[in-house]
Image (cartoon, rainbow, N blue to C red):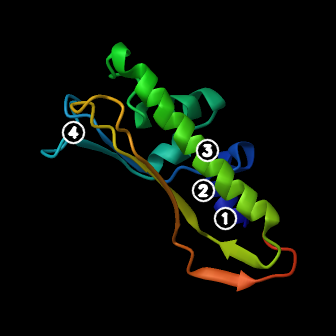
Amino acid sequence: KKREHQKYPQQELFGFRIVGKRVYIPSHKEAGDNGYVFYPKGLGRSLGSYEGLKDAFVVFFGLEVLDRSLLPARLKTITNVLLKLRSMQHWFRDNDEFCFCASSLLIAYEGDTETDGTLDMVAVKMIDFGRVRRQSGGDPGY
C-alpha cells in the first residue's frame, strides 16, 4: 500500500487515479495518423491539484477545441457520464458481498460532431476486475 501511495500520492486526495487516456484531437501536434493523442500513466502521476484534474477532464471531453455551438451536446454527454457513475456508485453502496481489488473504470463516449452534435453516446464500464472476492460488508472503499 505504501508503494502504491508513493506512485500516486494524489489518489488519496482525489479518491481515484487516472492511469492514461486516449483522446481524438486530429489537429493536435502530437496526434497520430489516426487522430488520437495518447496520454500515458505519467499523466495521472502529474496531476497534483484539483485544477490539474479539472484540466485533464477538459481535455478528455474535448472542451478546449470544441466549437461553442456544440457545447450543449457535450454537456449532455458529461451529464450522462455522471449519471452512469452515480448508478454504479449506488450499486457499490448496496453491495454487501463482494470486494473488488485493483479494478478500473473505462469511460468512453462518441464525440462525433459531424452528424448533428446530439448523438453523443456514453459507456462507463468496470474492467480489470479479475481479483474479486467475497467479503462480508462488501467494498466500502470503491
- Is disc 2 placed on a helix, strand or loop? helix
CA–CA distance in space, label 1 to label 4: 33 Å
In the picture, the disc for residue 31 is 4
CA–CA distance in space, label 1 to label 3: 33 Å
Verify CB contact (< 8 Å) between mark 4 and mark 2: no
Mark 1: few, some, or many residues within 10 Å (few <14, many ≥20)? few
CA–CA distance in space, label 2 to label 3: 30 Å
Q: Is residue 85 visible?
A: yes
In the picture, the disc for residue 100 is none
Mark 4: few, some, or many residues within 10 Å (few <14, many ≥20)? some
Q: Which residue is mark 1?
A: 3
Judge by depth and name the residue closer to the eye, 8 or 16: 16
Q: Is residue 142 visible?
A: no
Q: Which residue is mark 3?
A: 83
CA–CA distance in space, label 3 to label 4: 30 Å
Q: Amino acid at mark 3?
A: Leu
Judge by depth and name the residue closer to the eye, 30 or 75: 75
CA–CA distance in space, label 4 to label 2: 27 Å
Q: Amino acid at mark 4?
A: Ala
